[in-house]
Amino acid sequence: MLNQATPLRDSYCGRMAEDLGARRCDDLASDPVYARLDVQQQLSAASYLAVPLELSDRSRVGCLAALSLTPARFSDADEQLFAVLARVLG
């Protein structure tokens, strides 16, 4: 998916940032939110982890995210690390 633009609303992070999708998903292909995304059809990713980047006023300005081809790739510890990193970056 190099050099392709995806509207935020059609991305994993867009759905997560709108609180429509989970921050961690172990099986994207069977998830009712993420499986329907065009980007999922293109990438065939298996698992996803993301946390929003928020400013002190709680406005969301981005997200820190990772995808993997391995199902259930991300752990509770990974999610906690991402949350700490997001607070630092925000």
Image: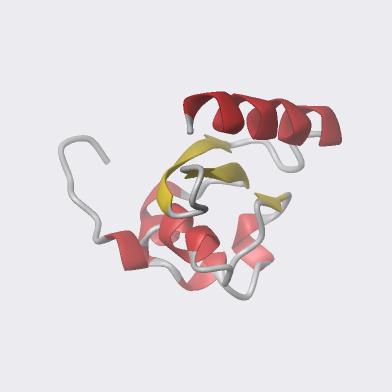
Q: Is residue 70 above or below residue 18?
A: above
- Give the residue drawn at x 71%, y 25%: 81
> Which residue sits furthest right?
76
Residue 68 appears in the rendering: yes
Instruction: Report the quarter where the N terminus lies.
Output: top left
Image quadrant in which you'd find residue 38: bottom left
Give the residue furthest to the front. Answer: 57
Colouring of the image: secondary structure
Nearest the viewer among 68 and 19 is 19
Residue 74 in view in this figure: no
Task: Tell me the residue at 17%/45% (across/down).
Answer: 4
> How far across and down, in percent of the image, does residue 68 sit?
58, 35
Residue that appears at 81% across and 34% down: 75
- Residue 45: give x, y in percent of width and height: 53, 46
Looking at the picture, does residue 37 appear above or below residue 66?
below
Left or right, 50 with reference to 38: right
Rendered location of residue 84, percent (x, y): 68, 27
Position of residue 51 in the picture relative to residue 7 (left or right):
right
Q: Is residue 51 above or below residue 83?
A: below
Pick the front one: 73 or 12? 12
Residue 8 vs residue 46, the one in the foreground: 8
Horizontal and vertical percent position of residue 49 = 62, 42
